[in-house]
Amino acid sequence: MRSSILVLLTCLSGSLAAAPPNVLLIMADDFRPEIGSYGSRALTPNLDKLAERSVQFERAYCQQAVCNPSRSSMLTGLRPDTLKLWNNGTHFRELNPDVTTLPLWFKEHGYTTRCVGKIFHNWHTAEKGDRRSWSADEFLYYANHGDDKPLITGELPPNLTTLSSRVYGATTICECRDVPDEAYYDGRVAAEAQRVMQESKENPFFLAVGFWKPHAPFNAPKKYWDMYDRSKLPPLNTARPEGAPEIAFHQSTEILGPVAKQTPVTPEQAAEMRHGYFANISYMDAQIGKVLEALEKSPAASNTIILFVADHGYHIGEHSLWGKTSDFEYDAHVPLMISAPGVSQRGKKTAALAELVDVFPTLVDLCGLPQPKALDGKSLAPILADSSQSVKTAAFTQHPRPAYYDREPDKQPKAMGYSVRTVSVRYTEWRVWKTKGVIARELYATEQDPAESKNRVDDPTLKVQQAEAEKLLRAQFVP
C-alpha cells in the first residue's frame, strides 16, 4: 500500500502545483445501486458514463439507513453514535453546535461552496439546512417530498397510473404525467446547477448537487416510465429471510401508510411501484447528465473531482419491506463513484469496503487540505490510485427500533441493531437500548447469498467468519 500512496501523493502534488482541484459532489436520495455499471437493469446511461471515468466502489455502505442520520454522518465525518443522532427530527447542530461540516471545512480553506438541492436533511428539523456551510444561499434544499407536485403552465395532463391509490404527503404514491423535467424538483435542481456551474468563475469551487429522487413519490415524467417494460423488470421475491428475528423488520409506514390503515399490496400494485422507482432512477440519471455536460463545457472540466453517492439504500418489496430503516444489505448498500483527474484509475471497480463516513476525509485528502481532527472515517484515496488496495476490514450500519422512535411517546429507542459488513458476511446484534443486552442476532453469507435469504447465525460452516465479525462489531460498538 505504501507504494500506491506515494504514487497518489506524487500525482496530487503535481496537480495542486497548477491549481487546487474543484469538487462536484452529486448525491441521490433513497438510491440503492440500481445502475447499469453495477449490473442492474436500470437504464442509467449518464451514471454508466461517469463510471467509465471513475473508480466504482462495489461495497460501499451507509451508517444508518434513513436520511438525517446518514447525511449528518457523511457531512461531518462522524458516526451516528458520535453525533448522538439516530432520528429525522433532530438537527445535527442541536446536539453538536460547533461541529465542522465537509463544505464548511472547504469554505474555511479558500473554496467557494454552493448547495443546489437536498444535501443536508431538511424538513423534519427546526433549523433548515446549514447556511454557515455555504458561500451563498442554498437552492431548493428545504421541502417535503410529498409536495413535489408538477408545476406547469396550462392544463395538467392526466395521471396515467391506474393501480396505486396510496398517498405520499400531498400527492399519490405513483404518478405518470406527460410533463417536462422541470415540472418536478430534480429538473429544477439540474437547471440551477447548470447555471451555478456557468457562473463559477472563482476557483476553486465546491458544488454540492442533491437530487430528491428516486425517493418516493414515484412520479417521474411519462417518458421515463415509457423506458421500461414492466413485465421485464427484475422479479420480486417478497419472502422474509428464513430464521430472521421479527425485530429486524419494520412496518413500511413511509410507503404503505399508517399500520391501522394498511391493506395488502397486490402483485399489480407492487409491480407499478417498482416500475415507478425505476422510472425515478432514469429521470434522476437524465438530470445528472445535464450537470455533467455543463461541467464538460466549462473551463473547470479537467480539474474537477466528481464524487457520486447516495444517502442509503432502499427496499421495493423485498423481504416484504417498502422503504428504508433496516440493517439489511438492500438498505445499507449504496453506490459510490469517485473521479479524480490525474489521480484515480479510470473505469476500475474495487471490492474494497467503504463507508459514507469516509467521504469527508477522502475529499480533503484529494484536495490537499489539512485533515480535521477526530474524524471517524478513513481516506479512500489510496484505493483510487490502486483499486486492489483496501483501507478497512469492515463497514458498520445501525438502526433503532422503533424505526422512527422519536415519534413515540417516550422519544427513546427500545433497541438498536448494530451491523457489521465484512468481505464475506453481514452480522447484526440487536441490543436493548437501556441495558445493552443482546436480544437477537443475524448472520448472512452475503457474498454467496446477496439477497440475504437465510439467517445463518451459529452455522458451524461460518464459525470463523462469524467470530471475526463479532470481534469487529464489539470493538466498534462497545456494549
Image (spheres, grey):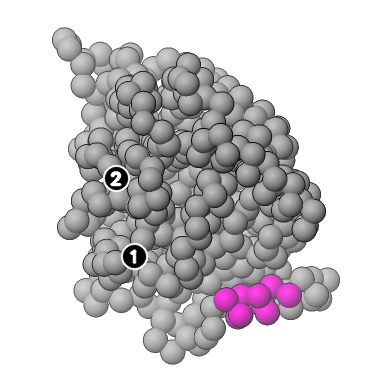
Q: Which of 308 and 219 is in front in this view?
A: 308
* The quadrant where residue 54 appears: top right
Between 202 and 458, which is closer to the camera in this rendering? 202
Q: Is residue 179 magenta?
A: no
* Residue under numbered circle 2: 134
Q: Earlier in the sequence, mark 1 or mark 2?
A: 1
Q: Residue at x 43, y 72 (%)?
A: 81
Q: Furthest residue to the bottom? A: 435
- Residue 67 is marked as none
* Residue drawn 52% across the image and 86% down it: 479
Percent position of residue 25, x then y: 46, 39
| Quarter holding residue 41 | top right
Could you tell me which residue is drawn at 59 percent across and 29 percent down?
A: 50
Element under disc 1: loop
Left or right of 307 on screen, residue 468: right
* Residue displayed at 83% across by 71% down: 461
Q: Tell me: residue 176, above or below residue 250.
A: above
Name the magenta segment's main secondary structure.
helix
User: Magenta residues?
Assistant: 468-476
Q: What residue type is labelled 1?
A: Val
Residue 337 point in image, percent of width and height: 59, 40
- Who is closer to the viewer here, 140 or 24? 24
Residue pointed to by mark 1: 99
Question: If the image is split into quadrants, where does the N terminus sit?
Answer: bottom right
Front in this rendered view, residue 22 or 129: 22
Q: Which residue ends up furthest to the right in the rendered image? A: 461
**In screen coordinates, is 272 left or right of 38?**
left
Where does residue 318 sit, x and y in percent of width and height? 55, 48
- CA neighbours of label 1 inside 10 A, class few (<14), some (14 to 19), many (20+): some
Q: How far apart are marks 1 and 2 (CA)?
A: 15 Å
Q: What residue type is labelled 2?
A: Trp
